[in-house]
Image (cartoon, rainbow, N blue to C red):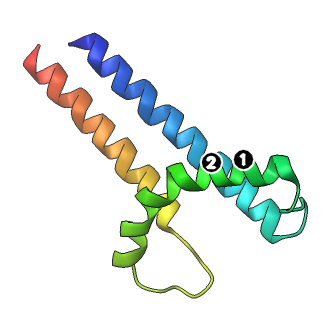
Amino acid sequence: MYSILWLIDWVVQAYTYLLFAYIVIDLLVKFGVVNAYNRVIYVVMDFLSKIIEPALRPIRNVMPNLGGIDLSPVVLVLALQFGLRLLHELVAGLA
């Protein structure tokens, strides 16, 4: 059971790191620091967008419009960490 918990923990942490990478690269593109037409940047952003956007889309549909501020990544990170903590408590309670 602990092996499965370790795997889930690892996947959630990796997804969180990918989410942070997506946020940073997206901001760098929006502020013009990196060129979005660069092939490497385009491939990385496309990959991260296909992985991250399906999780952010339902959160954005529920959250109110705050203008130019997008808090959906923060909500996603909090939800992932809360779910992970809940899973750890559940496994500890079963042991």
Q: Quadrant of the N terminus?
A: top left
Q: Amino acid at mark 1?
A: Val
Residue at the spot of label 2? 47
Q: Which image quadrant: the C terminus? A: top left
State whether residue 3 is above or below residue 19.
above
Mark 2: which secondary structure? helix
Q: Amino acid at mark 2?
A: Phe
Question: Dot 2, crowdedness within 10 Å: few (<14), some or many (≥20)?
Answer: few
43 or 27: nearer the viewer: 43
Residue that numbered label 1 is attached to = 44
Q: Which residue is rendered at x = 30% and y = 36% of the image?
A: 85
Q: Residue at x 83, y 46 (%)?
A: 40
For this rendering, which residue is in front, 47 or 82?
47
For mark 1, does the 10 Å Cα neighbourhood hold few (<14), some (14 to 19), or many (20 or more) residues?
Answer: few
**50, 28: nearer the viewer:** 50
Residue 79's place in the image compared with 83, above or below, is below
Q: Position of residue 52 (x, y in %)?
A: 51, 53
In the displayed structure, 49 sits above or below 16; it is below
Q: Quadrant of residue 36?
A: bottom right
Evaluate if marks 1 and 2 touch, with contact meaning CB atoms under 8 Å apart. Answer: yes
Q: Is residue 75 visible?
A: no
Q: Is residue 27 left or right of residue 64?
A: right
Q: Tag 1's secondary structure?
A: helix
Residue at x-position 88% and y-position 55%: 38
User: In the rendered view, does 67 fall on the left or right side of 95?
Assistant: right
Where residue 13 sits: x, y (%)? 48, 33
